[in-house]
Image (cartoon, grey):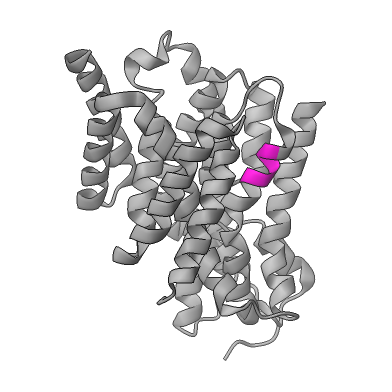
Amino acid sequence: MRTLLALLGMALGTYALRAGGFWLIARFAPSPFVERALGHTPGAVIVALVAPALLAGGWPDLAAAAITATVALRTRSLLAAIGAGTLAVCLFRFLLT
Amino acid sequence: MASTHSFHSIDALTGARLAIPLAVSVFVYGSVFGMLASGKGMTLVHATGMSATLFAGAAQFVVVELWTDPLPVLLLTVTTLIVNVRFLLYGATIAPWFSDLTSLQRYGSAFFLVDETFALAAGEMQRDGDRRALLLGSGLLLWMGWVGGTFAGHFARQLVEDPAAWGLDFVYIAVFIALLVGLRKGPRDVVPWGVAAVVALVTERVLPGAWYVVLGGVAGSVAGALRGGD
């Protein structure tokens, strides 16, 4: 029951956002402040999610995170970065713990 | 200029063809989601159902981390909305280009707005193109990749006994770091990302559950907007 409620809430809410852009734009123009804040939202949410998890993981995770970022910057490939980071964390956990 | 009500299936097919390489990576990425979801005790029906109805990669990787018993329904919904609020901007950006289409065409296409399909559609719009069905076609193919990947990942998880030994618990961190690299806008990310990290680290110790994600995200966004200069 709770699961169904959560799935419905997330799906309907997300669709409302997707459709809402089409609906809203004809009626209201967002203020420049709101527009700027929305532009920063995806990055800020992801940083907020990752920061505590990274710190809890200690040195092996931090080092693997650096490798993930480097590969993502170099290759622009999500999959290459994820693969390299995951391999690196196995190696560092083996070496550092 | 766009002719009235032009929305052709041939353009949808072109969109699907353009999205083939993306769909392959979305499939692999979806199977990582399926594995993580299965590891958190989500059933096959719940995980594929979520992928089919939510169809939002970043949000689903966040949700799977917050998937605990008892399920924090309000937190899950609010967090999802905050991660996905960018879709509002995407819709608003392409809305004028869709204005002479029927409601069904407009609101049907809206379901398939994700980062990749938006980039494809916005590119066509900026070139003064008229192939508005590109969004629907590419979106359908990516949706199939995402749902199929989730399905495959659920079964792949059964083959792996200890996910931490394979670094699979790190996969979601790696996913987000790679996404952040793609999202970055340069030095002006320092303030919003720094504020988001500090607020998240502090509230994580003070507040129960995972409200730190919401508070950190909102604080970072406001800090970025206050700083101005976009």
- Residue B13, percent across and down? 54, 61
Residue B164 location, quadrant: top left
Q: Is residue A44 magenta?
A: no
Residue B118 shows in this picture: no
- Span shown in magenta: B75-79
- From what the image shows, is residue B127 above or below residue B49? below
Majority secondary structure of magenta residues: helix
Instruction: From this view, report whether residue B222 is shown above or below residue A79.
Output: below
Kindly give the residue lying farthest to the top in the view shown.
B161
**Residue at 57%, 91% in the rendered image:** B1
Closest to the observer, A50 or B169? A50
What percent of the width, then of the height, locates residue A22? Answer: 69, 71
* Quarter holding residue B93: bottom right
Which quarter of the rendering shows the C terminus of chain B?
bottom left
Is B146 left, or right, of B70 in this rendering? left
Does residue B176 appear to the left or right of A31 in the view shown? Answer: left
Which residue is at 42% across, 58% downward?
B192
Residue B171 visible from this viewpoint: yes
Is B67 or B57 nearer to us in this picture?
B67
Frontmost residue, B162 versus B212: B212
- Residue B113 occupies which quadrant of the picture? bottom right
Q: Is residue A70 left or right of residue B141?
A: left
Q: Position of residue B111 (x, y in %)?
A: 67, 56
For this orientation, the residue located farthest to the right is A1
Q: Residue at x 34, y 13 (%)?
A: B165
